[in-house]
Amino acid sequence: MMQRMQVICAVALAAGLMTTGTAMAQAHAGTPPTAPVTNNQAGNQAASQAPVPTGPAAEVQRGYAGVKANILKAATEMPDDAYTYKPEPDIRTFARVVNHVSEVQLRICGSVNHKDPADLFKVPAETADKVAIVEALKASFTECDKAYATATDTNLTEMFTLGKATRSRIGALWGNVSHDNEQYATLALYMRLKGLVPPSSEK
């Protein structure tokens, strides 16, 4: 079993690195390249497209948006009966990984939003059905949408309490993106082991 776990961990790490690299590349690259167009089309597009936002706040917002889409799609596409799946008896189920994303997001983004922990959405047990678990996940993203939307280049150094630590706004927001990417790598691995294609690998 130890050898099998080492293989699983190695695949998860590789997936995490690739996912994080993709998210960071997207965050710095801005709008992805489009198909070739004619000169007239290019002129029309240049006139109609708004400039891509730049700066530290825009970068972290793009990073968050990318991993949010992947996690939500992974949670939606995994079949109901696969939420109890886990590759080995002593590791987390798919449901538990999703719940962990919800819990951490609510804690981090709730703190950024200066929200009382008692007022945050309550995450159900991992034994709950898919509908309840996905509802909590969506609630955590709703909380984070507010946190990322209020980020500006001028308030990123604001300090606040996160648990027993004091964090800057930019540190907390990028920390959440990083954690989401790590957990998405695990969700993607579970999907692969169930014969499904993860959202970030869809063509």
Image (spheres, rainbow, N blue to C red):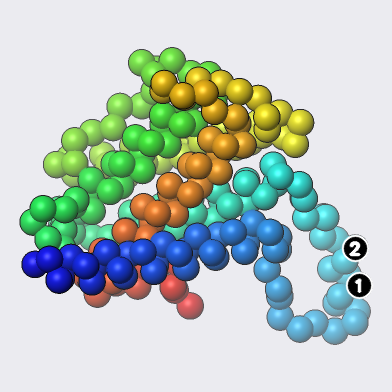
- Which numbered marker is on residue 43? 1
Asked if 79 appears above or below 164 in the picture, the reply is below
Splitting the image into 4 quarters, where does residue 13 fall? Answer: bottom left
Asked if 25 appears above or below 76 in the picture, the reply is below
Kind of residue indicated by mark 2: Ala
Splitting the image into 4 quarters, where does residue 16 fall? Answer: bottom left
Residue pictured at 55% horizontal, 43% vertical: 174
Asked if 13 appears above or below 92 in the picture, the reply is below
Residue pictured at 8% horizontal, 56% vertical: 89
Residue pictured at 26% horizontal, 39% vertical: 132
- Looking at the picture, how far across and down is residue 124, in whole percent? 23, 33
Q: Locate residue 28 relative to residue 122 in the image: left or right.
A: right
Whether label 1 touches label 2, CB < 8 Å:
yes
Q: Can you say which quadrant of the picture contains the N terminus? A: bottom left
- Is residue 88 at least partly visible in the picture? yes
Residue pictured at 68% horizontal, 29% vertical: 157
Splitting the image into 4 quarters, where does residue 140 fall? Answer: top left
Q: Residues within 10 Å of mark 1 (few under 14, many from 20)?
A: few
Kind of residue indicated by mark 1: Gly
Disc 1 and disc 2: Cα gap in Å?
6 Å
- Is residue 135 at least partly visible in the picture? no
Q: Locate residue 177 relative to residue 1 in the image: left or right.
A: right
- Looking at the picture, how far across and down is residue 158, in whole percent? 65, 25
- Which numbered marker is on residue 47? 2
- Looking at the picture, how far across and down is residue 17, in whole percent? 45, 64
Q: Locate residue 65 relative to residue 134 in the image: left or right.
A: right
Tag 2, which secondary structure?
A: helix
